[in-house]
Amino acid sequence: MNRAGGILSSRGARRRLPPSARAGVARWLSSPAADEAANTPSRRRIRDDGLGLADFVRAAQVSGDDAHSSDRRPSEPRSGPPPSPSDIGDEFDDDALITDAMSSISSGGGGEDAAARLGRRLVGSEDDDLDIDAEGAGLRRHHTLKFHLKTYGCQMNVNDTDIVRSILLDNHKETSREHGGASGGDGPPPLRFEEVADEVQADVLLTNTCAIRDNAERKVWQRLHTLRAHDRNFPLDGDDGTKGDGLMGRTKEARKQAQAGRRGGRKRIIGVLGCMAERLKEDMFEQGTADVVVGPDAYRDLPRLISVLAAPSLPTYDGRDGDSGTQGAPSIPTERAVNVQLSLDETYASITPVRANPDDVSAFVSVMRGCNNMCSYCVVPFTRGRERSRDLESVVGETRRLLDEEGIREVILLGQNVNSYHDGRGGRSRNVSNGDGGTYRTSNDGFSNVFRARHGGGHRFADLLEAVSSLSPELRVRFTSPHPKDYPPELLGLMAERPNVCSHLHMPAQSGSSAVLERMRRGYTREAYLDLIADARSAIPGVSISSDFIAGFCGETEAEHLETLSLMKEVRYDQAFMFAYSMRGRTHAHRTMADDVPEDVKARRLSEVIDVFRRNVQARNEEVEVGTARLVLVEGESKRSTPRDRVWSGRTDGNKRVVFDDAAVPTEEDALAAAAA
């Protein structure tokens, strides 16, 4: 509803109700009968096609100034017979309600009862697009679009999807606040978004993408082509008025009939979000596969871009010259919308992410965005922009809310280069040198900052980790994805001190050859990396270490490949993520190097890297894990679980997955009793 007493029809026309009608609706909405009607399961849906309500308010229309004037003239009564149910649609079963309200109000008296009955029918409807404010002083319609989200890529993309979900679900609230209240103002009603699990039911199909490797992009292109082809054959509303409910469960003849009946229906809006959108920009519109393209720093603009694309199928509004609600001119169709502007300060700190599954025991919290490392193979600085960090208090506040309100047992701090976190607004950090005015300390002297030194005062990652881990000793704290150069002694020492900071370090080596590391612009040598591994295992006994490796980087020789294999054998990683090199546009390697390692050689070297890792991790698990008691955070039922044989899955402190049977775990008291017996 609208506090000014306006009604929005599905064609966007806004009209003023006279004071008597507004008062009647207000009295009804504040009555116990209204509460009862609003909770009645058998409420009927009232479809407003603009005709019945328009006729009603046209006959009773009075301007806001005239409404308070003692000498106002009553509106002219409507000429001709009252509209029949067939004229109105099926929004009301009988025309008595409309006719009574029109005749009573236009004659200057007794309109309250008719308006109350009209309000009762509106409140009793199932049309959730009608918002009724707390004071019951008016009506305001929100136009609802259903959206579906699918995510590819890293944990950061999962968290970004939660941010997008929050922005869309809160859009009508934010837009209303911008225009002076949930139901005030003369602007068009804001869009309301509703998430659906079934893609077929969605008006808007959004895909959050990854651009780190060519294979990830191929998957996205395949999905976009599939979505467009399906939408072309099964639009939302065909000429026969049916919904495009997909192909499943239909015979061949039924599919042909459905396709014939649905030609000419509304097409879905297909959107591409994230890193691939930022990398390819307008190229994402190729072959008409996408309608809206939004980069990682422009998610706040997504509702506006969608509303521009959806405008031709939504009611229009024109409030020119103080008009209280004339029908606007038809909007000009917009075929595509894009915003891929990167930001130097966007962190979405003010957005509360909405998790897809609030019951998950683990939650992501983004602490920084972007990357300044400029590794020669990596596209992230070009798709995510420069580094910027959230203030420490906002990260701690979000984690506290997740702990207190959603009951999480583990938080994972996220960032493209998470351990280079730097909140320059804070106080003195625990991991800066004392003698050089706040100079940041790297892991050891063999590491350097290739792009930009991170000096100056403020809170560093060790300070953030200390603050978050202090919220509760029962809250597990992890972080990803780090860079090896940003593990100063203070950070390793804090991890050793805090039992709830997980004993797991991700240290992406990428290669075991110093020559390859130099071409990659990683900022360290093999020797410096091995010194860091030794420091970490000395400071944190039993620490689990994982890594990333790229096989077949530009110019990699067989000897350099063998150095990678020897590094893996020496370190004996607990986990590893291994890939063949994929040239990415806009990177330093793309501009200055040749992707000269044949694909079959890349595949063979990758196979050897995987084989060495598997042999070493099996041997290490047999030495370290077998016979050792581990505290496991249970995440849920395993994929192997069946109703007859339930199996659970969880992770250890070292981030190793454990699958175990559904059996009672002996308590300490059970063990003592067994020993006594």
Image (cartoon, rainbow, N blue to C red):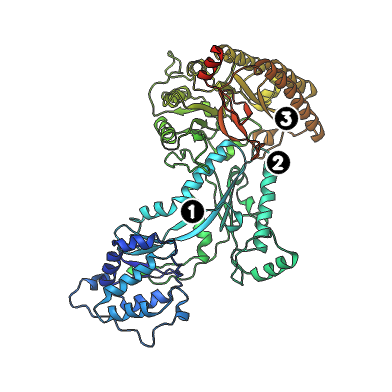
Tell me the number on the disc at residue 579: none
Q: Which residue is mark 3?
A: 553
Q: Please name the amino acid that badge 1 sits on.
A: Pro
Disc 2 residue type?
Asn
Residue 571: x, y in percent? Answer: 67, 17
| Residue 235 locus on image (x, y percent) | 62, 64
Label 1 residue SS: helix
Viewer-side residue, 566 vs 183: 183
Q: Position of residue 134 (x, y in %)?
A: 31, 57
Residue 215: mark = 2
Amino acid type of the residue tagged 3 in the rendering: Phe
Of badges 3 and 1, the one in the foreground is 1
The residue indicated by pointer 1 is 303
Q: Are marks 2 and 3 in contact (CB under 8 Å)?
A: no
Which quadrant holds the C terminus? Answer: top right
| Residue in the image at 50% along x and 39% along y | 359
Q: Earlier in the sequence, mark 3 or mark 1?
A: 1
Of residue 600 and residue 314, the one placed in the foreground of this image is 314
